[in-house]
Image (cartoon, rainbow, N blue to C red):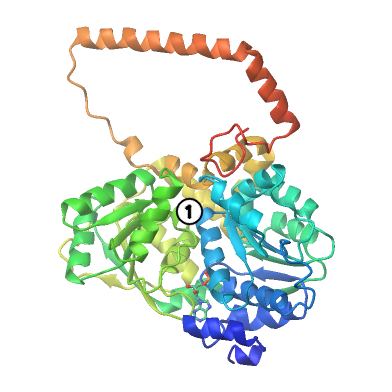
Amino acid sequence: MTFKDLEIIDPILKALEAKGYTHPTPIQEQSIPILLRGKDLLGCAQTGTGKTAAFAIPIIQQMAIDPRREQSKGNIKALIVTPTRELAIQIGDNFKQYGQHTGLRGTVIFGGVSQHKQTSALRRGIDILVATPGRLLDLIDQGYISLGKIEYFVLDEADHMLDMGFIHPIKKIIAMLPEKRQSLFFSATMPPSIVNLTKKILVNPEKVTIKPEQATAERVEQSIYFVTKKDKINLLTHIIKEKNVDSCLVFSRTKHGANKIVKLLDRNGIRGEAIHGNKSQVARQRALKNFKDGRTNVLVATDIAARGIDVADLELVVNYDLPNISETYVHRIGRTGRARASGVAISFCNAEERAYLRDIEKLISQKIPIVNDHPYVDDSPEAVPAKKKQGQRNQNNRSRNGNGQRRNKPQGNRQGNNKSRDQKQGERNSEPKEERQDRRNSQDRNTPKPQSKKSDRQKSKEQGQNKKRLDDKNKNKSKQNKSYGRRKREEEKKKNPFDRTRNSPRSDFPLL
Ligand code: AMP
């Protein structure tokens, strides 16, 4: 089957040819005909399967051949909502590439950056809008966007949206859409909360399911290196240098760990950059661009920051730390071996991570080959992870084994118990889960801090200063609490929680 067989129009075929796509991926083959018939679609698939083109191509095609196109010029007709800024940018790029010969116009909006460029693009008039939920609601509130003329609505990565506490913004957005529209809904997992949401969005949908785990795991050449925690950096350096690796994506469990890896690689003469939630949006985009353009050879990422990262010809994925959630392993190695390509992924496993390895092998139903001919082999016996950590892992496993929705179950409980706090988390940093993960897993937290060699006099002087600082802070705080302005702002926020005009420009979502 080729794209021509799917009755794709020439301007799009030309763009696909330029990208080197000849054959549709399974999700494209199944979804495109359904969508060209105007049906709603429920897609159970994740990034890496080619799902962006699966929805972008038919949307562009229907808009391009619409006889009412001239009359509706300047109205936003397609809205794609996606959880992270990186994904939004990527989807926007794909629309631009596939639609380049159709004359359709689109833009991408997301938080963490000034809104000026985005509002200018909106003022000029666009057909397709790709957005993250917080900035979308913000610009709707400010009057820059109206959803009244939307004909195509895509909710992408719905499970991640809910994980990030975006349920209320999503419901708010859906309520603003016209009844008559074509809706597409994509999620990698289908827990009950997602199924409920699909009922609010889709009418009589057709369902397409692409199981990525097995497919990804089979396509990617994987191996395991047993190595102590201390030797991991030497092993990474050894592999990059020995194999002459030009583009290597390294996964670290924590943000702090990611920074440390970059620093140590630099000492060993290897240029890399880190990408994680503590970096500004500009720094994240710059790091990604430097990596994609080949200016740096190594990108060290945490899981959520890496979500959706799509780098053509990625040579190697390295799991510097083995993830304690097995599905994360599949997501990670899926960064290489995209669509139909094959890829290489290696994993470092220290004595404490052996149990994680067993979980992963169970999930992918494969034994990952062990590499023994390297200079840092660790043949010590398996160590039991620290008690607290093991408890967490088991908890995760229990909920996964119970219903296959491990990652969402604890989330659901948490949301149920403390929704507003959860939302706030998502608002502050789009990465609450990663934050939590970091907090739980941070090895360094348990490492004793070096003892300071300060004299007793110095110590007591510092204590006095700290106490004074704390007293001043509390005084200021109580002053602020009583201030009229603050009370007023709080009242306004209660009335309109999405008014972020006074909030930090860094957040992708309202800070309550
Ligand atoms: P996605 O799941 O949309 O993130 O796509 C994963 C990767 O597959 C991206 O790098 C796409 O550019 C690529 N891709 C999508 N469709 C095709 C295709 N039909 N043939 C080859 N590569 C594709």
Q: What amino acid is found at the position of numbered circle 1 in the picture?
A: Ile
Task: Find numbered disc 1 in the image and state the secondary structure of the residue it sits on.
Answer: helix
78 shown above or below 301: below
Residue at the image point whose x is 56% and y is 75% from the top:
100
Residue at the image point whose x is 62% and y is 41% from the top:
414
- Can you tell which quarter of the image residue 249 is in? bottom left
* Residue 251 visible in image: no
Q: Split into 4 quadrants, where in the image is the C terminus?
A: top right
Q: Position of residue 35 (x, y in %)?
A: 72, 77
15 shown above or below 70: below
Q: Position of residue 292 (x, y in %)?
A: 36, 65
Residue pointed to by mark 1: 304
Q: Position of residue 161 (x, y in %)?
A: 62, 53
Q: Nearer the viewer, residue 38 or 19?
A: 19
Q: Nearer the viewer, residue 426 or 67?
A: 67
Residue at the image point whose x is 70% and y is 35% from the top:
497
Q: Position of residue 205 (x, y in %)?
A: 78, 71
